[in-house]
Amino acid sequence: MAELIVPTGQPDELLPTTGAGTRNFGWWGMVLFICVEATLFALLLVSYFYLRFRSGPVWPPDGIENPKLKLVLIMSAILWSSSFPVHMAHHAIKKKGDVKKLKAYLAIGFVLGAVFLALQLGKEYPDIARHEFTPRTDAYGSLFFTITGLHGAHVFVGLMMNAWVQMRAWQGAFDRHHHVSVQNFTMYWHFVDVVWLFVLTTLYLSPQLG
Amino acid sequence: MDRVSTGRVDCGRKSVAPVVFFAAGAALAVGGCTGDSSIVSPKGPAARSVAGIWWPMLIVATAVFVFVAGMLLLAAARGRRKTEDEAKVTPRWGEPFIVIAGVGVSGAILVGFFLFSLARVQALTDAGRRTALRITVTGHDWWWEVRYPNGAVTANEIHIPAGQKVKVALESADVIHSFWVPRLGPKVDMIPGMHNDLWLEAEEPGIYRGQCAEFCGLQHANMIIRVVADPPADFDRWMAAQAEPAAPSDAAGRQIFETQTCAGCHRVRGTAAEGAVGPDLTHFGGRATLGAGVLPLSPANLRRWITDPQGVKPGVTMPPTTLSAADLDHLVTYLEGLR
Amino acid sequence: MATIEAGLASPEHLEEEWHEEPGLGSFLTTVDHKRIGKRYLYTGLLFLVIGGVESLVMRIQLAHSNLHVLDPETYNQLFTMHGVTMMFLFATPVLSGFGNYLVPLMIGARDMAFPRLNAFGYWVFLGAGVFFYSSFVIHRLPDAGWFNYTPLSDSVYSAGPNVDFYALGLIFMGISTTAGSINFIVTILKMRAPGMSLDRMPIFVWGELAMALTVIFALPALTLANFLLELERRAGFHFFAPAGGGQPLLWQHLFWIFGHPEVYLVVLPALGIASAIIPTMCRRPMIGYTYIVLAEMAIALIGFGVWVHHMFATGLPSIGLGFISLTSFLVVIPSGVQIFAWLATLWAGKPVLTTPMLFILGFIILFVIGGLSGPMLAAIPLDQQVTDTYFVVAHFHYVLVGGAMFPIFAGIYFWAPKMTGRLLHEGWGKASFWLMFVGFNALFFPMHILGLRGQPRRMYTYQPGHGWDSLNLLETVGAFVLALGILVTFVNWVWSTKRGKEAGHDPWGGETLEWATTSPPAEYNFENIPTIRSREPMWDQPELGPHGQPVEAGGRGLGGGHNTLCTSLLEAEPEVVVPMPHESPWPLLLTIALFFVFLGLVIRSPFFWGVAAGAGVISTAGWFWPRGQTQET
């Protein structure tokens, strides 16, 4: 598909009917949505520190051990690595209009994100709930499950977006000039990965320092 | 293009407004003075210090208001005589005026009051460092538990020695309450899990009224504090007496108290009544009110309270107690005798 | 390369593209910002009436000491819902309604950036209002105050569903406010007519921008607080109750981190209304435009740094309190800057005392009074005496009712002629103003005195013998006078819509672009997107008017399609011609699904809200499903 260019009514002035980045309303919408969600997570992490520093000197409290790192570091590696195929997917369609690569990379990104969630819901959560604490144990438990859970919900929404974009790709919707959904999804996915960095540092790493 | 003509400005109505506002300002100045809970009628050094912030701020606020309202009304009046062309001329003082008045003068006044009030905060904190006595008040839904260092426990009526600083440690047994005796000093919240405190001093003996000042549920409106400032010698006697077990009182009434539901919630030290849910009633008869200030203490009111607390203070935790008339008489006599 | 008809867009062609067939169908599926804006206004004003009735009933109860008109539970529900209704269901929606209607007109656009999101925002607002008040049917309205402090609002002390309606209702409403704010920001930044650089943008639009940016960064705090509260109430989590390691003050921090910016986000567009009316009614450009714009932004920014002043009595450490005291004093400065800019403009200009102008003059007086009691509350020890008393109630009603409701009424008289084509009756308008002004002051001025005399707030009754009775009675009378004044405007509006004097396209001789359209505007707003060369285009560019700007002067027809223009952020240079969506059922369908999700949560039925969530997913898919072309934008 070629780019659609139209006259505006001013002599010799022709403008496109699509734009990317700052020339697209949807891009701005996604940026602002990310601002909202980022504020939400920031406040949640601040609440974590607030409750932590107003509780006693021992953190985690109530005899709970420091968070275990092995599984979560693997999960983090998987999640962060998923940013590469997602980035490559966007790059492929933007620079070369390569729909095949777009589909392939999106699929890889999907699988990596899904593995992250599977490990979190299928292994990490049950292990912790059975042997260490539940959200009902105390504020520490509530914070842990709420923060990681909210992040996981954002990953889930990201997977649904990924699936949607793949579906559109299969419908032949994208080319070099028309791929705003891919761009917006990519931004959201990177955002989710960045949030995980803060969650990991706050929940898993900072208690080890105390 | 059509435009709406405005008709004549009714200048008469416009000039009434400043008079009304002066009157209102005066009312504010004078009106706040009276009343037994007025913060601008202080009876203690803390409240006096705060009142000393209020008056200068009121004066400056009134002056600023007069200036702004005056300029507004004059501008409206002057506009009648102008032409539209004159209106389009931009005076050179316009933007400097905005900066000088809006940033310069306002900023100076505001920062000035900030520093002044901060100094008062410091002074109030410093003044509270050395206190003669420390009591603990715990907020409950909807009454006040008061504990003295000699082990005395009472409720709702707090005696302090006049002319001396008293530290009040503030706790809560349930939700957030706030301890406030306006003529003696500012309020501080009682927050479960936190250990706040404030200091009180009454300059002279007397009775000072306070009230819970943080919305705490159904009977937040009826959680009155009665502070009684005694001359120091009287206070010492009072505090010693409060630590004593209950005075002997009507024996039949005591029996009823111990065997009915009363003892399940209330304590009367020296008897079998050891309940810890409601107020300590060991020296109840000596208090002036019941139900945290909702009624004056009298036999008739006490009867009403015992048989129908929900009718007096809907939502209160105390259930109604049904007794025969004779039993009720004995119970009331007993309670009145607990001095 | 596909082409569209070049040249001037003919009105017939535009009519065809933009027309929405009247009838139930388009009523439910409209995406026209003007229809949606009016709906926000009407619905918001309906909630003003509801919130007002709540306050009148409370004032009857408080007219004298120890009255038993209301039991304490009912009173607590009334004062809670009065606050929730006025703040969330009246003030912000009505100001958003003005914004929705006027912003595209003032910036020379044909609609908002996301027309379907706009419709969705309205439906969610209506749904949230219905959700809140559905609790009335079971006499379980929220009753823990509009600020809902813990531990009172947790499941131990508020066992019923009242607080669940509160928390879930606010989360639901938050979706609308967030959607609306995203829409405003993108519209204002990217859809201004060519030549309308940021420093030529009307101050009213700046006010809506400041409001929307504040929402983005403040509202998540409230959403989070309510989310955590529901987890604690319903799922046994621990955040606020001390047993289990929670902190009651965490709620207060999160609530006020939202709550203080909230009051500024109510006031900022209202100040923008004043800045729209004053230049027109003074027959001259605003003096100090740049200062006012900077002040609007400064209020928004500094407003994020003062929240702890609601917590001066909670026993927090003095150092932190001292800092907040300073910021609370300083936040007065940008408001003062605006007042003095208006005073300069009024002094230099020729104020014309129409009804809108009277409401604005009244607003200035009342807002200044409120702004003078504010610094008193910034002084920590004085605040510690008067907080939680009627003094504070007086302060915030002066700044919120004086500072937002009076400009709203000014806006009604000023812009209703544009919306309906007919002026409101001037005589009745002035009567309404005086009733409201006198009634307001009789109601709220004595509250300063009562607060100083020690009458605390949030109390269903008070004892006799403290000197509070007579002023309380005066306040009750004042409340009814104020209500009468409001009623007069409503009657005036209804009557004038059919029988008022015809307004024409520019009854006041205004300077901004909304006066270039017909009254009411055509569905497509402008025949041509104009090129702007001034901050007061209607005064400086005589070629602007209902017949579109000629091509020689810079008009752009965009081919007469269902299009509008996307322009650059700073200088508003044309970038993209954007096709806009037509009517759609999905915003309403998604809202209905969400309503049942929240209802299912409050009645604790996972099946119910699970099914509703599924319907929501389907509606979202339907919304995003490409129509016609498979080609993506």
Image (cartoon, rainbow, N blue to C red):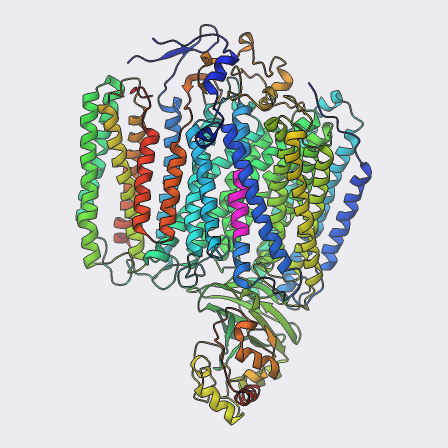
**Residue at figure coordinates x 59%, y 81% from the top left:** B235
Q: Is residue C83 magenta?
A: yes
User: In the displayed structure, would residue C285 be above or below residue C370?
Assistant: above
Q: Nearer the viewer, residue C249 or B133?
A: C249
x and y percentages locating residue C102 in the rendered image? 55, 28
x and y percentages locating residue C332 in the rendered image? 60, 43
User: In the displayed structure, would residue C142 be above or below residue B14?
Assistant: below
Q: Residue furthest front?
A: C23
Quadrant the C terminus of chain B occupies: bottom right
**Residue at figure coordinates x 44%, y 5% from the top left:** A12
Quarter of image, res A163: top left
Residue B172 seen anywhere in this rendered image of the structure: yes
User: In the displayed structure, would residue B73 be above or below residue C386?
Assistant: above
Quadrant the N terminus of chain B occupies: top right
**Residue at figure coordinates x 55%, y 46% from the top left:** C86
Instruction: Using residue A44 as the reference point, say whether residue C85 is left or right of it.
Output: right
Instruction: Using residue C529 as the reference point, say whether residue C159 is left or right of it.
Output: left
x and y percentages locating residue C399 in the rendered image? 61, 45
Instruction: Using residue A36 as the reference point, say whether residue C498 is left or right of it.
Output: right
Magenta stretch, overall SS = helix
Residue B95 seen anywhere in this rendered image of the structure: no
Q: Nearer the viewer, residue C39 or A64?
A: C39
Quarter of image, res B250: bottom right
Q: Which residues are magenta?
A: C81-94
